[in-house]
């Protein structure tokens, strides 16, 4: 981002006091990613950019090769560079899979196990 783009970015971003996410008040695509007309950090050409990538490249540094920028806060609209991490496409896919299956894993390992322990305890669940 050049100076005028940075000023425009600052006017459009608001920090959520609870999550710390930087919410962009401009356009968001169908997946929830914020978009704006900024300079492409790779090519230097002005056009529609994903704002989390613009923010990452400006505050954290260059995005290497085909790497993707993952939202560690799981909020696709967030542009907070502290909530963004550069990862390979494979790592990003694995993370998405893990997050999508978290409720299932939670049920198996954290809900079912205590129930089993309780049912093993004499008299606890006997009716
Ligand atoms: Zn965030």
Image: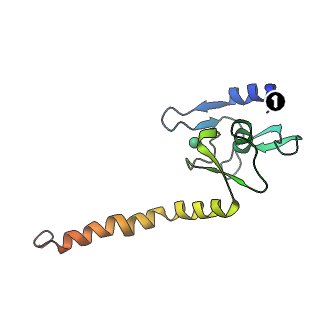
On the image, which quarter does residue 114 sit in? bottom left
Badge count: 1
Side of 62 where 84 appears, left or right: left
Residue at the location (73% across, 55% down)?
Answer: 67
**Residue under pointer 1:** 2
Badge 1 density bin: few <14, some 14–19, many ≥20, Cα 10 Å: few
Q: Quadrant of the C terminus?
A: bottom left
Q: Quadrant of ligand 1?
A: top right
Residue at the location (77% across, 57% down)?
Answer: 66
Side of 71 where 37 appears, left or right: right
Q: Nearer the viewer, residue 74 or 127?
A: 74
Relative vertical location of residue 97 with respect to residue 119 in this rendering, above or below: above
Residue 58 lies, in percent from the top left, at: 74, 36
Mark 1 lies on a secondary structure that is: loop
Relative vertical location of residue 7 with respect to residue 127 in this rendering, above or below: above
Relative vertical location of residue 29 with respect to residue 120 in this rendering, above or below: above
Residue at the location (84% across, 45% down)?
Answer: 42
Residue 96 lies, in percent from the top left, at: 59, 60
Q: Quadrant of the N terminus?
A: top right
Ligand 1 is within 8 Å of the C-beta of the residue at disc 1: no
Residue 93 lies, in percent from the top left, at: 64, 63
Relative vertical location of residue 86 with respect to residue 88 in this rendering, above or below: above
Residue at the location (53% across, 63% down)?
Answer: 98
Q: How is the image coloured?
A: rainbow
Q: Nearer the viewer, residue 69 or 28?
A: 69
Side of 59 where 107 appears, left or right: left
């Amino acid at each position: 981002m050049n100076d005028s783009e940075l000023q425009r970015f600052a006017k459009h971003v608001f920090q959520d006091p609870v999550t710390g996410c930087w919410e962009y008040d401009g356009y968001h695509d169908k997946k929830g990613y914020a978009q704006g007309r900024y300079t492409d950090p790779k090519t230097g050409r002005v056009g529609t950019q994903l704002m989390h990538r613009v923010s990452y490249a400006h505050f954290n540094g260059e995005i290497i090769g085909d790497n993707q920028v993952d939202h560690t806060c799981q909020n696709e609209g967030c542009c907070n560079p502290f909530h963004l991490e550069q990862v390979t496409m494979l790592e990003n896919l694995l993370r998405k899979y893990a997050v999508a299956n978290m409720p299932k894993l939670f049920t198996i390992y954290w809900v079912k196990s205590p129930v089993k322990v309780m049912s093993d305890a004499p008299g606890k669940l006997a009716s």
